[in-house]
Amino acid sequence: MARSKNKRHPQGELRIIGGQWRSRKLGFFPAEGLRPTPDRVRETLFNWLSPVIRDARCADLFAGSGALGLEALSRGACHCDFIDISSTALSQVSQHLATLQATQYGACHPGSAEQFLLGADGPLDIIFIDPPFGLSLVGPVCQALSTSTALAEEAWVYIETPKGEALPALPENWQLHRDKKAGDVAYRLFHLSQAPGSGRVVPPAQIV
């Protein structure tokens, strides 16, 4: 859930675009700069994830409105943890889960992504990283993930950033699976294989 001044989506509303809740619209408090990941980005992302989304355990590390995690549940994920430092945001995600009669499939965790990962129960199959833009939050979270014991052996990590922003150095076992740009957003999907001997850091990646 990136924060941006570019309002590409009707303020205060998100639409689930696929799966069992397809076309359901959910309102959220329109905090300054808050927006769901754009529809076309989510559509592409979940096309990439379609072979692995069913029965996956997910974590939406910067949940905001919950757009990514709710989309995952709609498309067959068995559980999603929603993490955010905003109690208002998490309260609204809880309301969304209740509205969708899906409270047993989601859990809300107040606090930072790093705090969650320190005590997370695994295995987590899919991680969504879509932090507020311009605050250099991707690096610390990727570092926390690289040492986390909560990841599944074959995990997937989605990262959304402003176009042209370089990613931090990532472990060697983070293999770029797909990447794309839409407007001023760059988004990437990494496949993480917990193979013996993995972990050497590779240079930052950048989309220009």
Image (cartoon, rainbow, N blue to C red):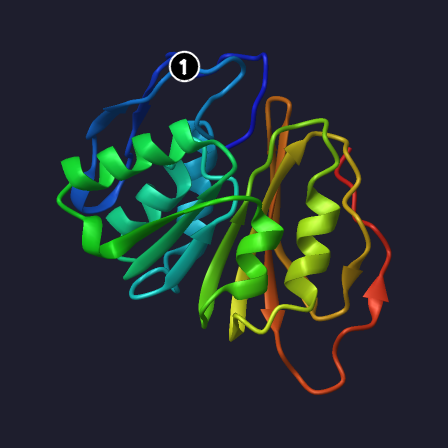
- Left or right: where 157 falls relative to 197: left
- Left or right: where 182 falls relative to 208: left
Quadrant assignment, res 4: top right
Q: Is residue 64 above or below residue 122?
A: above
Local secondary structure at mark 1:
loop
Quadrant assignment, res 16: top left
Within 10 angstroms of label 1, few (less than 14), some, or many (20 or more) residues?
some
Quadrant position of the C terminus in the picture: top right
Q: State whether residue 43 appears in this view.
A: no
Instruction: Residue 159 in the image: state x and y as whole percent.
Output: 60, 45
* Residue drawn at point x = 61 percent, y = 30 percent: 132
Which kind of residue does numbered mark 1 sit on?
Pro
* Residue drawn at point x = 69 percent, y = 54 percent: 142
- Left or right: where 45 falls relative to 145: left
Residue at the farthest bottom position: 196
* Residue drawn at point x = 56 percent, y = 23 percent: 3
Q: Which residue is mark 1?
A: 30
Instruction: Residue 65 in the image: state x and y as whole percent.
Output: 39, 30
Instruction: Residue 9 in the image: state x and y as whole percent.
Output: 41, 16
Residue situated in front as seen by the camera: 22 or 34: 34
Residue at the farthest right position: 203
Residue situated in front as seen by the camera: 150 or 40: 150
Instruction: Residue 173 in the image: state x and y as whole percent.
Output: 70, 71
Q: How many marks?
A: 1
